[in-house]
Image: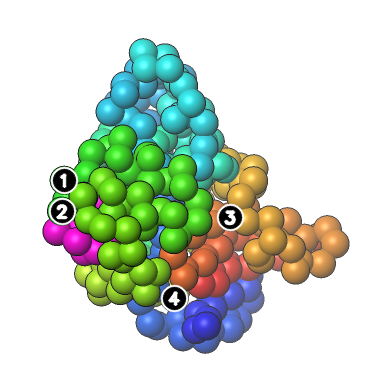
Amino acid sequence: GTVAVYIKDIESGVALEHNADQPQYLASVVKMFVMFGVFRLIELEKITLDDKLTIKRSDYVDGAGTVNWMESGSRITIRKLLENMMQLSDNAATDILIDLVGRDGVRKEAYWSGVKDVGPITTLLEVRERVFRNLHPLGGRLTRHDHLDLWRVREYPQKLALFSRKIRKPAGTFQPKDLDAAFDKFYKTRCNQATLRTLGVALENLQLGNVVSSKASEQMISIMAGTKTGKKRTPSVLPAGWKMAYKTGTQRRRLCAAGVITTPDNQHLATAIC
């Protein structure tokens, strides 16, 4: 595989980089920018963490998390949506919050935090829609619930067989290499991408209290410190006593982890690896 790395000791300014100036597909790491946007609305007193939103059937999106298992009509706080999005990488929670902030708002927050080269932002559902439309034009007719059906099938040969049935094509029409090509076509759009060098700037600003406000930055790091996904990634190789507030990103043939590492002597490392 190809690895990109950015690690900066925030206190000393010393940085280690490898392929850090090459755009990377960040996958769910972009949920950090959604979080920035939510805290901007809180700072502007347009919403609060305790405000509740109503879950609708149209909110269900394939992926991890708990929102998909909530009954339509259930109420959930913005605080819980944030925790689900960041700590469990809940795609349904994410798309609800993207609707709240707006895609332009999410991209602006990324830019203001230091990610000056961020590409267009999509919802998580739109990623699936574009990929399956790349696989076959009839994939554009799949419904939200068709995508849920496809997500429930974990193995790709079976997933592709189900996709074939849904668009009324013979079994065996699509192979995993065709899905790889569909994802590659999507990756070339630069959606949800940035360089790790600029992502590192955002992480540094977050640690320094410069994202939205010092209070908001502190709250956001606290949320990221509770992340439960990706325990076998960067956190698994840290020495005893080192802690990481982070977000993971996962997509076909793509893995990322990005966040702030704190050492026992209170050094802070802005760290992004894809």
Disc 2 from disc 3: Cα separation: 38 Å
Where disc 1 sits, the SS reads helix
Distance (Cα) linking label 4 and label 2: 38 Å
The residue tagged 3 is 246
Q: Earlier in the sequence, mark 4 or mark 2?
A: 2
Magenta segment: does it hold 259?
no
- What's under tag 2, amino acid-wise? Leu
Residue labelled with disc 4:
197
Answer yes or no: do the residues labelled 4 and 2 have beta carbons within 8 Å?
no
Residue 37: name its quadrant: top left
Main secondary-structure element of the magenta-colored stretch: helix
Disc 3 versus disc 1: nearer the observer: 1
Q: Residue at x 35, y 49 (%)?
A: 162
Q: Which residue is mark 1?
A: 141
Distance from the alpha carbon under mark 4 to that under mark 1: 38 Å
The answer to which of marks 4 and 1 sits earlier in the sequence is: 1
**Measured from the top left, where is residue 65 in percent x and y?**
52, 37
Position above or below: 200 against 95: below
Q: Secondary structure at mark 4?
A: helix
Residue type highlighted by circle 4: Arg
User: Tag 2, which secondary structure?
Assistant: helix
Write down the residue under mark 2. 138
Q: Earlier in the sequence, mark 3 or mark 1?
A: 1
The boundaries of the magenta stretch are 129-137
